[in-house]
């Protein structure tokens, strides 16, 4: 058998491997996790104007909120079109969640008129940060898990 025949047989096998179907999102869970991330990003954008934090927290909330909307929307789009979710996007979302948790401690709390506003802004960043971290870590884990998915059975 010549080298070209061996190469043609290997190429044919690779084509068979590429044409197998993979069930990328069997439970639809990844799509809804991404939607929740985007909704939390919208909340962070709105919260920056509703609660009026100090300048550092304001811009942090705006930038993180916009990033969460974009990243959550991107992974939602991928999952809705039966593609694999992005591990990198999920990991970055988890890091943004950790940043939200750290923000009140790093940038300080607000200069509101009442202590309730300060507590509300503080706990908002902590709770939303925890939710974003958990959702991002879960999304990255699930995307990593489906990255090595076995071919779906043909019916």
Image (cartoon, grey):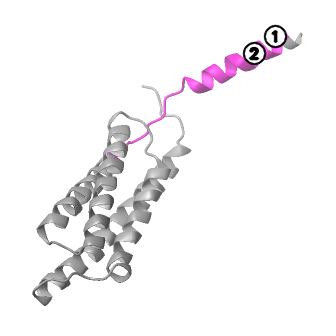
Residue drawn at point x = 33 percent, y = 50 percent: 72
Residue 107 in picture, x, y percent from top left: 34, 78
Q: Residue furthest bottom?
A: 115
Question: Quick check: marks 2 and 1 in contact, CB under 8 Å?
Answer: yes
Most foreground residue, 107 or 69: 107
Side (left or right) of 77 relative to 149: left
Residue 61 in picture, x, y percent from top left: 28, 65
On whether residue 5 falls in the magenta region, the answer is: yes
- Categorize mark 1 by other alpha carbons within 10 Å: few (<14), some (14-19), many (20+): few
Residue 63: image quadrant is: bottom left
Q: Mark 1 — residue?
A: 5
- Categorize mark 2 by other alpha carbons within 10 Å: few (<14), some (14-19), many (20+): few
Q: Report the span colored magenta.
A: 4-30
Q: Quadrant of the C terminus?
A: top left
Q: Give SS at disc 2.
A: helix
Q: Give SS at disc 1.
A: helix
> Most prominent secondary structure in the magenta stretch?
helix
On whether residue 115 falls in the magenta region, the answer is: no
Structural distance between the alpha carbons of marks 2 and 1: 6 Å
Viewer can see residue 102: yes
Side (left or right) of 138 relative to 116: right
Most foreground residue, 12 or 117: 117
Residue 105: image quadrant is: bottom left
């Amino acid at each position: 058998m010549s080298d070209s025949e061996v190469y043609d047989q290997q190429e044919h096998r690779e084509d068979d491997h590429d044409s197998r179907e993979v069930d990328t999102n069997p439970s639809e869970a990844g799509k809804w996790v991404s939607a929740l991330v985007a909704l939390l990003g919208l909340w962070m954008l709105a919260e920056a104007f509703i609660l009026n934090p100090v300048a550092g927290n304001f811009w942090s909330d705006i930038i993180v909120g916009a990033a969460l909307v974009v990243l959550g929307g991107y992974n939602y789009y991928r999952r809705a079109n039966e593609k694999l979710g992005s591990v990198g996007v999920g990991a970055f979302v988890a890091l943004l969640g950790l940043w939200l948790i750290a923000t009140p401690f790093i940038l300080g709390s607000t200069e509101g008129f009442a202590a309730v506003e300060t507590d509300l802004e503080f706990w908002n960043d902590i709770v939303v940060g925890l939710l974003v971290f958990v959702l991002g870590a879960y999304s990255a884990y699930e995307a990593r898990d489906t990255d090595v998915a076995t071919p779906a059975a043909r019916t």
